[in-house]
Amino acid sequence: MTDLRAYLDRTAALAQQMPLDVIETVIQRIVDAGDTDHTIFVLGNGGSAATASHFANDLGKGDVTGSPRRLRVMALTDNVPLMTAWANDTEYRRVFAEQLRNFVRAGDVVIGVSASGRSPNVLEAMRLGRAAGACTIGFTGQSGGELKDLVDHCVRVPSDNVQHIEDFHLVAFHLVYAHLRDTYLNRPDGR
C-alpha cells in the first residue's frame, strides 16, 4: 500500500507544478483556430494515441449540445486502415505526416503527444505541420525530447515517470476542454 500512496502523493505534487501559462496559451491557439475556421489535428503514439483520440472526441463533441460554436478537429490516430496502409507502403514514422499532408493548412493547429518527446512518427508530423505554417503544440514529459524544439508551444509534465506524464496529459486536455466549454463553446455567440 505504501507504493500506492506514494504514487498518489507524487501525483498531487505534480498537479501543483503543471505549466498553466503554457496551457492557457494552448487554449488561446485553439480559440484562434476556431474563430478562423481552421482545423485542430491531434496525434500520439502508443498510449498517447488513446489520449489524442480522447482529446479530439472532447473537442469535437464532449458535453456540448446545441452550441452554435463547433471546432473542426481530427484525430490522426483513428483511421487504422489508413495508418496501416501508410506504414506498409512507406514506413511507420510517416503514418501521421502523410495523413496530415492531405489536410493541413497555414493557420491550423497540430497537437502532438509523446511522453518521451522522441516518437519518430510524432516528430515527422510536427515537422510537416510547421513547414505548412500550422501552429504546432507538443505535450511531453520533463525532458521534452526533440519534440520541445520542433513546436511553437510545449506542455512539459515535470516528471520522467511515463505513467505520471500520461496522467497529466489527460488532465491538461481536460483543463483545456473544460475551459473551452465554459468560456467559448457554450456561449450563445461562441465568443
Image (cartoon, grey):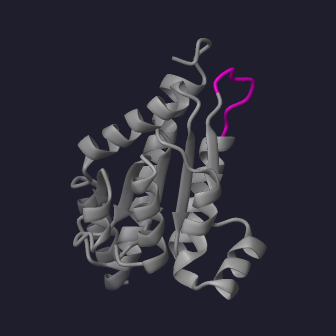
Left or right: 83 as drawn, with respect to 22 = right
Give x and y (percent) for residue 56: 61, 51
Q: Residue at x 60, y 23 (%)?
A: 186
Q: Quadrant of residue 65?
A: top right
Decide whether residue 189 is among the magenta residues.
no
Please tell me whether the stretch drawn in magenta is mainly helix, strand or loop: loop
The spot of residue 75 in percent (x, y) is 63, 57
Q: Visible in this render: residue 125?
A: yes
Residue at image location 32% in from the left, 57% down from the top: 151
- How many circles with numbers are drawn on the protein? 0
Q: Is residue 110 left or right of residue 161?
A: right
Q: Quadrant of the N terminus?
A: bottom left
Q: Is residue 90 placed above or below 33 in the rendered structure? A: below
Report whether 25 appears left or right of 99.
Answer: left
User: Magenta segment range?
Assistant: 62-69
Can you tell which quarter of the image residue 14 is in? bottom left
Q: Is residue 56 above or below residue 178?
A: below
Q: Is residue 46 visible?
A: no
Whether 63 is among the magenta residues is yes
- The x and y percentages for residue 79 are 73, 67
Whole-percent x, y for residue 166 in the image: 43, 69
Looking at the image, which is closer to me, 41 or 105? Answer: 105
Left or right: 2 with respect to 36?
A: left
Q: Nearer the viewer, residue 90 or 26?
A: 90
What residue is rendered at 28% in x and 72% in y?
A: 146
50 lies above or below 30: below
Spot the residue most to the right.
Answer: 81
